[in-house]
Image (cartoon, grey):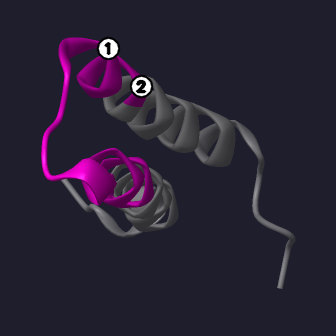
Amino acid sequence: MQWKPYAKAVVAALLAGLGALGTALVDNTVTPAEWVTVAGATLAGLGVVYAVPNKPA
């Protein structure tokens, strides 16, 4: 299986999740509600970017 068609979505999910985690770590602790936010941002980044087709070359 080639991962190249999914690379853009995976990178977007990582960046969204890490961004949310960075925001949650401002007070040096992550609450359960913040973990839910991190998971939601990761899944949203993955799903939204995956759903948008690439422009033809």
Q: Which of the image's four quarters has the C terminus?
A: bottom right
The kind of secondary structure the magenta stretch mainly shows is: helix
Disc 2 target residue: 37
Residue type at mark 2 is Thr
Q: How many marks?
A: 2
Judge left or right: residue 21 versus residue 48.
Answer: left
Q: Quadrant of residue 22?
A: bottom left
Question: Looking at the image, which is closer to me, 27 or 21?
Answer: 27
| Tag 1 secondary structure | helix
Disc marking residue 33: 1
Judge left or right: residue 25 versus residue 29.
Answer: right
Give coordinates of residue 17: x percent, y percent: 36, 48
Real-space Cα separation, disc 2 to disc 1, in angstroms: 6 Å
Give coordinates of residue 49: x percent, y percent: 64, 48
Q: Quadrant of residue 39?
A: top left
25 in magenta: yes
Q: Residues within 10 Å of mark 1 (few under 14, many from 20)?
A: few
Judge left or right: residue 13 versus residue 8.
Answer: left
| Tag 2 secondary structure | helix
Q: What is the span of residues highlighted in magenta in the rendered image?
A: 18-37
Q: Residue furthest left?
A: 29
Q: Residue at x 40, y 38 (%)?
A: 42
Give coordinates of residue 47: x percent, y percent: 56, 32
Q: Residue at x 35, y 34 (%)?
A: 38
Residue type at mark 1 is Ala
